Amino acid sequence: MRYKNYICDLDGTLLNTIDDLREAVNHALRENGLPLRTHAEVLSFVGNGIRLLIERAMPKDGDKHPKFDAVFDSFRAYYAIHCEDKTAPYDGILEMLRALKDDGCRIAVVSNKVDSAVQKLMPVYFGGLIDVAVGENEAAGIRKKPAPDAVFYAMERLGATKEDSVFIGDSEVDYQTAVNADLPCISVLWGFRTREFLEGIGASDFVTDPAEIVRRQTQ
């Protein structure tokens, strides 16, 4: 099906950010004398923003742990500097974005990553391919995913309607965001969750590579 507006998750969908996230988590834990986390553990922790990422990474008690604030602050300071060290677009993503733009589509990013990091990463990796980018900004009253607020904000800036838009993501948070926004959802299988996991939470429309999204749009 052809769409005019593509609203995309960032981490696990457009960008492979997990190595930099893992390094930042373990730097913060190490600095505070706490046990480190494995790649698989950090992979399972991401998706709901950095505060919940650190809550899940703590050895116990989440944000009630006495060192939570120190770990959270350390993570934010380190990640602000190192968020581009190993991060890169997934294979085929830039080609997909260019093809969609050439077809007249508009593209938004809606992420639970803190907005300052989202804005920093956009020009580094995507140049002018992204029309609107929205990161976590609950201080402004925009609830983070899976609430639909950021999606609606992005759609307003795009001039989009529900009838001409689709949401693309890789996680249960993204699928639920699409449901809450009453949008169709395409779940990508190169990201942070498996097909089996996503099917278990109700997702049913999958793509295995970015070129498939282009083929659907241009058929």
Image (spheres, helix red, strand yellow):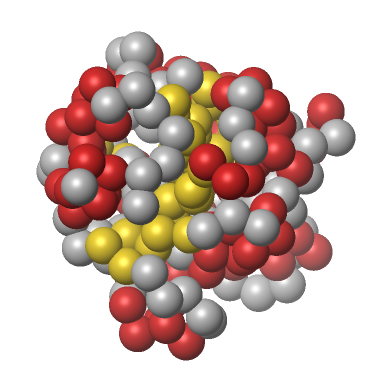
Q: Quadrant of residue 102?
A: top left
- Asked if residue 168 lies left or right of residue 219, the reply is right
**Residue 19's x, y, as percent?**
29, 48
Q: In terms of depth relative to the viewer, which is nearer, 105 or 210? A: 105
Q: In terms of depth relative to the viewer, which is nearer, 14 or 139? A: 14
**Residue 70's x, y, as percent?**
67, 44
Point 52% across, 80% down: residue: 202
Point 73% across, 54% down: residue: 147
- Asked if residue 90 lies left or right of residue 56, the reply is left
- Asked if residue 206 lies left or right of residue 210, the reply is right
Query: Is 218 above or below relative to 40?
Result: above
Query: Is 202 above or below relative to 12?
Result: below
**Residue 182's x, y, as percent?**
66, 58
Q: Quadrant of residue 128?
A: top left
The answer to whether residue 156 shows anywhere in this view is yes
Point 45% across, 69% down: residue: 44
- Asked if residue 83 lies left or right of residue 86, the reply is right
Point 60% across, 31% down: residue: 160
Q: In terms of depth relative to the viewer, which is nearer, 127 or 168? A: 168
Q: In terms of depth relative to the viewer, which is nearer, 21 or 36? A: 21
Q: Quadrant of residue 141?
A: top right
Point out the residue furthest to the front here: 219
**Residue 1's x, y, as percent?**
35, 52
The answer to whether residue 146 shows anywhere in this view is no
Q: What is the total number of numbered labels drawn onto the structure image?
A: 0
